[in-house]
Image (spheres, rainbow, N blue to C red):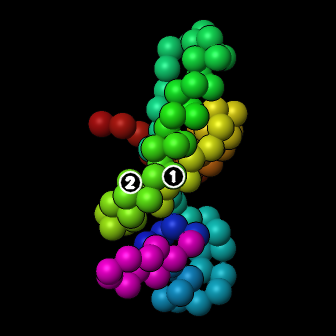
Amino acid sequence: MSSNSPKRLEGKVVIVTGAGCVGPGWGNGRAVASNWYGMMGPAGTPPDVVKRVNEALRRTLDHPGVRTNLEQLGLVPAPGSAAEFTTLIRNDTAKWGRVVKEHNIHGE
């Protein structure tokens, strides 16, 4: 079993990256796709509220029991700042927007 994530997923089942199956240079980095989950709030949420929610979420994800349970589901907790999440969303939107345009993909 393999995944398109750039890093091997650890767990009960051996899940390697595509590069681990095919070899270095697999997909030339273009086929790398990762799922992510995050929390968003309404535009204009006060920065102190964003900071408090982010800190609480980070503490929760750093709890050993929560981390273990998520990892057993094949999830890799990677909490970050609101700015990092904004950057991730912008980068993924640009990356997958290019794929959609290049392949003339349309919703049905």
- In reply to whether residue 14 is colored magenta, the answer given is yes
Which quarter shows the C terminus? top left
Please determine whether, in this image, residue 85 is positioned above or below residue 1: above
Q: Which mark is residue 44?
A: none
Q: Residue at x 58, y 17 (%)?
A: 49
The location of residue 47, given as percent across then percent down, is 66, 17
The location of residue 5, given as percent across then percent down, is 51, 67
Does residue 20 show up?
A: yes
- In reply to whether residue 83 is colored magenta, the answer given is no
Left or right? Give the position of 47 relative to 31. right
Q: Residue at x 63, y 32 (%)?
A: 82
| Residue assigned mark 2 | 66
Does residue 31 show up?
A: no
Please determine whether, in this image, residue 69 is positioned above or below residue 6: above
Residue type indicated by callout 2: Val
The location of residue 42, given as percent across then percent down, is 50, 14
Left or right? Give the position of 27 relative to 13. right
The location of residue 16, given as percent across then percent down, is 46, 82
Main structural element of the magenta stretch: helix, strand or loop?
loop
Q: Residue at x 44, y 59 (%)?
A: 64
Residue type indicated by callout 1: Asp
Left or right? Give the position of 53 relative to 84. left
**Circle 2 residues within 10 Å: few <14, some 14–19, many ≥20:** some
| Residue assigned mark 1 | 62
Q: Nearer the viewer, residue 39 or 93?
A: 39
Q: Contact, CB < 8 Å: mark 1 with mark 2?
A: yes
Please determine whether, in this image, residue 87 is positioned above or below residue 72: above
Q: Residue at x 33, y 60 (%)?
A: 69
Q: Which residues are magenta?
A: 7-16
